[in-house]
Image (tube, rainbow, N blue to C red):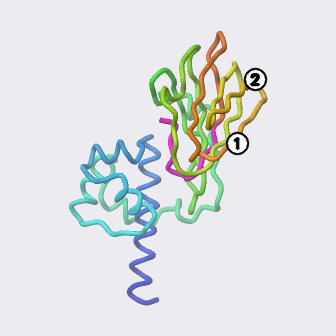
């Protein structure tokens, strides 16, 4: 293996460890950016193994993630696991849900090498919108309504979703959802790219 190939391999392993640690802390790229002073775009490239970080940057990242610097470089059993992840109900219930404006969400997906999608469980209150303004971002999204009633608008088209209904759409089209039921709405959300978050 050449020096360049070794550097690339270490960079990818380092990026995977940073991403896994960030998700364990339920940090978004933006929240880690605020904590470290490093841009979210830089952190995203670092996690993908597309750029390198200085020692001072790695110290800042490991400190904010609450892990020792050496843990970013140690080869762990996690690196040897097959490409599957199990999310246990009891594990999720032990942690507080992440909060947005009028709603909460919990990550459902785990960490896979070369992961392409993320999944979340969303809950939001009657009359609350997941986004008060129309949202656009890259990727695709699937919303599956588990409980409640949802008014969903995409690119000027409005549809009403009931439990069991599902919508799959291009996220570059302006979109938003609103809870129009009397109780809390619960949804399953699957989204690409992997670092997209329901905020």
User: What is the number of the mark on residue 102?
Assistant: none
Mark 1 lies on a secondary structure that is: strand
* Residue on which disc 2 sits: 162
Number of on-image labels: 2
* Residue on which disc 1 sits: 168
Q: Earlier in the sequence, mark 2 or mark 1?
A: 2
Q: Please, is residue 78 above or below residue 86 in the view?
A: below
In percent of the image, x 74 and y 35: which residue is there?
166
In the image, farthest residue toward the right: 164
In percent of the image, x 63 and y 44: which residue is there?
141
In percent of the image, x 59 and y 14: which residue is there?
126
Q: Nearer the viewer, residue 21 or 198?
A: 198
Q: Is residue 120 part of the magenta span, yes or no?
A: no
Left or right: 24 as drawn, with respect to 188? left
Left or right: 98 as drawn, with respect to 191? left
- How much space separates mark 2 and mark 1, taking CA atoms? 15 Å
In the image, farthest residue toward the left: 56
Stretch of the chain drawn in magenta: 189-199
Q: Nearer the viewer, residue 167 or 48?
A: 167
In percent of the image, x 63 and y 51: which residue is there?
85
In the image, farthest residue toward the top: 182
Left or right: 197 as drawn, with respect to 58? right
Q: Residues within 10 Å of mark 2 (few under 14, many from 20)?
A: some
At which x and y percent is residue 182? 65, 9
In the image, farthest residue toward the front: 156
Q: Is residue 193 part of the magenta span, yes or no?
A: yes
Q: Please, is residue 13 above or below residue 8 in the view?
A: above
Find residue 108 and report its image quarter.
top right
Mark 2 lies on a secondary structure that is: loop
Name the main secondary structure of what is drawn in magenta. loop
């Amino acid at each position: 293996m050449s020096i360049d190939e070794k550097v690339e391999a270490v960079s990818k392993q380092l990026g995977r460890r940073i991403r896994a640690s960030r998700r364990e802390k339920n940090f978004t790229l933006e929240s880690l950016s605020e904590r470290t002073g490093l841009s979210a775009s830089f952190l995203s490239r670092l996690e993908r193994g597309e750029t390198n970080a200085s020692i001072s940057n790695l110290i800042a990242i490991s400190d904010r993630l609450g892990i020792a610097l050496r843990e970013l470089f140690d080869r762990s059993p996690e690196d040897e696991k097959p490409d599957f992840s199990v999310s246990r109900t009891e594990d999720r219930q032990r942690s507080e849900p992440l909060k947005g404006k009028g709603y909460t969400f919990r990550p459902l997906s785990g960490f896979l090498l070369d992961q392409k999608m993320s999944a979340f469980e969303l809950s939001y209150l009657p009359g609350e919108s997941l986004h008060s303004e129309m949202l656009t971002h890259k990727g695709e999204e699937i919303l599956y309504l588990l409980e409640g009633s949802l008014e969903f608008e995409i690119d000027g088209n409005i549809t009403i979703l009931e439990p069991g209904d599902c919508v799959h759409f291009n996220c570059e089209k302006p979109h938003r959802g609103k809870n129009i039921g009397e109780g809390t709405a619960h949804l399953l959300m699957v989204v690409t790219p992997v670092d997209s978050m329901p905020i």
